[in-house]
Image (cartoon, rainbow, N blue to C red):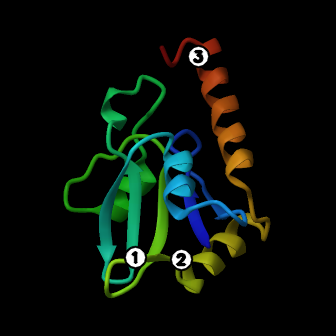
Amino acid sequence: MKAIYINDIDQRPYLVEKEEGRTTLSFLQDLVEGLIESVSLTSKTDLWVNEEGLFRSDFTLNTFASLLAGKGYNLVGPAVMTGVTSDGGTVDIDQMFVEMTTDTYGDKTYTVEEVLTIRHDQVDQLRAQGELV
């Protein structure tokens, strides 16, 4: 399954692919670093966030994801965009979003571990600068 990971630190989308053998639930939970909560963007697109994100000191406002969610949302922490079926199943993100991401940021597809390493390195850097507790 392909999804778009939206990093709350650099506000950048990353194309991420679920590895063979990993469940969708563990894929989403690993990407948002905890329990998941869904925000419906359209009838074909969901946005997943950490349901306890407001309590995490290492999570920051995800402006990109908040703008996508609209409706007065102020989402914190990493977010993940996926496709959704009419019966609520989670599937690949629409190809249009894949193309928008790869056209702007290159065609690299990341693993869960790669995007989490990027984010954690950025968090460590902000902590060292005194910008995060």
The residue labelled by disc 2 is 93
The label on residue 45 is 1
Q: Quadrant of residue 108?
A: bottom right
Residue 20 occupies quadrant? bottom right
Per the image, the residue denoted by label 3 is 127
From the viewer's side, name the closer residue of 60 and 51: 51
Which of disc 1 and disc 3 is earlier in sequence? 1
State yes or no: discs 1 and 2 in contact (Cβ < 8 Å): yes
* Mark 3 surroundings: few (<14), some (14-19) or many (≥20) residues within 10 A: few
Left or right of 16: which side holds 38? left
Q: Say what amino acid the circle numbered 2 marks.
A: Ile
Q: Amino acid at mark 3?
A: Arg
**Residue furthest to the bottom:** 86
Q: Nearer the viewer, mark 3 or mark 1?
A: 1
Give the spatial CA distance, label 1 vs label 2: 7 Å
Q: As shown in the figure, which amino acid type bears the numbered disc 1?
A: Thr
Which quadrant holds the N terminus? bottom right
Q: Position of residue 66 (x, y in %)?
A: 35, 54
Name the front one of labels 2 and 3.
2
